[in-house]
Image (cartoon, rainbow, N blue to C red):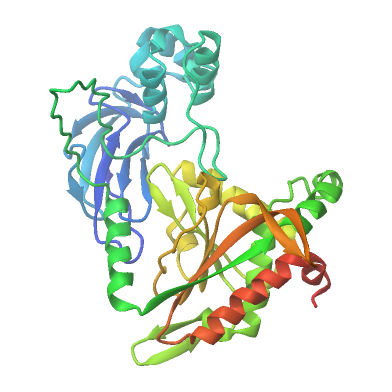
Amino acid sequence: MTIEVKVPVLPESVADATILTWNKQEGDVVERDDVLAELETDKVVLEVPATESGVLGKILKQEGETVVANELLAVIEEGAGAVPAATEAVASEVAGDANAASSPAVRRLLSEHDLDAASVKGTGKGGRILKEDVLAAAKTSAAPAQPAPVAAAAPVAKAAPAPVAPVVELNDSDRVEKRVPMTRLRAKIAERLVDAQHTTAMLTTFNEVNMKPIMDLRKKYQERFVKTHDVKLGFMSFFVKAVTEALKKFPAVNASIDGSDIVYHGYFDIGVAVSSPRGLVVPVVRNTDQMGLADTEKKIIDYGQRATKGAIALDEMQGGTFTITNGGTFGSMMSTPILNPPQSGILGMHAIKERAMVVDGQVVVLPMMYLALSYDHRIIDGKEAVQFLVTVKDLLEEPARLLLDL
């Protein structure tokens, strides 16, 4: 019996997708729920699972081709050459590299660490090699370490969808160029950034905040906080809380423009910009006015980990009313963040640096951070923007006010 493998139903507002990679090749034995292929849209990566066990037959659409919902991708010959469950482990050993390293993330890691799949012991089902197995083997063989993860990211990133340019040794006479197609997500980011510049009256106002009170609070209560909530107390939850309280006082910053109308939102859904291997994504923490610091931290950590795997759903990135982005994670001292339409405000955090500050006539060294608020001047006046940012600053410098709702 022949089973058709089709493009799944695409998320709303997504017209088509690009075949990112085939995890199985023609003639490979597949089990039900095996991920056969990955499709990239301009917002998320979708997996195409096998609906039945069998052998992958003809692949009708190749990597890089554009497809639409319900389009036929390949066929599975059900039962033809399928491996019985009892002999699955043996079959895996015989199959060797092709089966064990079928995951694109695993293949990428093997390549990065210059490892042969046959030399890596798989601990997954049927001897399948997992990403953790590759990292363990790389550490054992003293292979080069993995690059440091991005902000709030899990240790291992999903393979980037765009072709990676090879390392090129250059000398004075070389004039080398490498042309690769822009990923769909990168193209969408570019489109939205240009659109924001062209369709909004964007301005940025700056201030600075003394981070010592929050740092002291974290140092004093971190151990008890972790024991109670099973999560570390970070900086981002304080910023989310401070922004939420400031938005209550300045509703225009939480509003958006729709045609000739201003829409004031009676809820607080804060987008938190997260860097992923595919580019910047902005998952939304919803109803932040109803969340404590621990719940906020857990949600942000979850988003950060899933962003590296391309596992954030489309609906989790829609509907935010304000955005926070943290360039300080990468060492940025100052920037002017670009609005995330249709939102009217975005707060940029930056690196914490010790600076000499004058307090009560005395010069003291304090851990300071520059803050940047970009806003749409069409609906937010300069006075409101400045007062909003000062409110955020004051709340962060007196964190007890956040906890006591003052």
Residue at figure coordinates x 63%, y 71% from the top left: 243
Q: Is residue 304 above or below residue 358?
A: above
- State the count of labels: 0
- Nearer the observer, 70 or 190: 190
For the question of whether residue 102 can be seen, the reply is no
Q: Is residue 248 above or below residue 231?
A: below
Q: Is residue 53 above or below residue 267?
A: above
- Report x, y in % for residue 318: 45, 66
Residue at figure coordinates x 60%, y 84% from the top left: 250
- Report x, y in % for residue 257: 40, 84
Q: Is residue 168 above or below residue 182?
A: above
- Report x, y in % for residue 369: 62, 57
178 relative to 332 in the view: left or right: left
Residue furthest bottom as drawn: 260
- Nearer the observer, 335 or 128: 335
Quarter of the view holding residue 16: bottom left
**Rendered-image quadrant of the N terminus:** top left
For the question of whether residue 405 can be seen, the reply is yes
- Nearer the observer, 206 or 19: 206
- Report x, y in % for residue 90: 45, 9
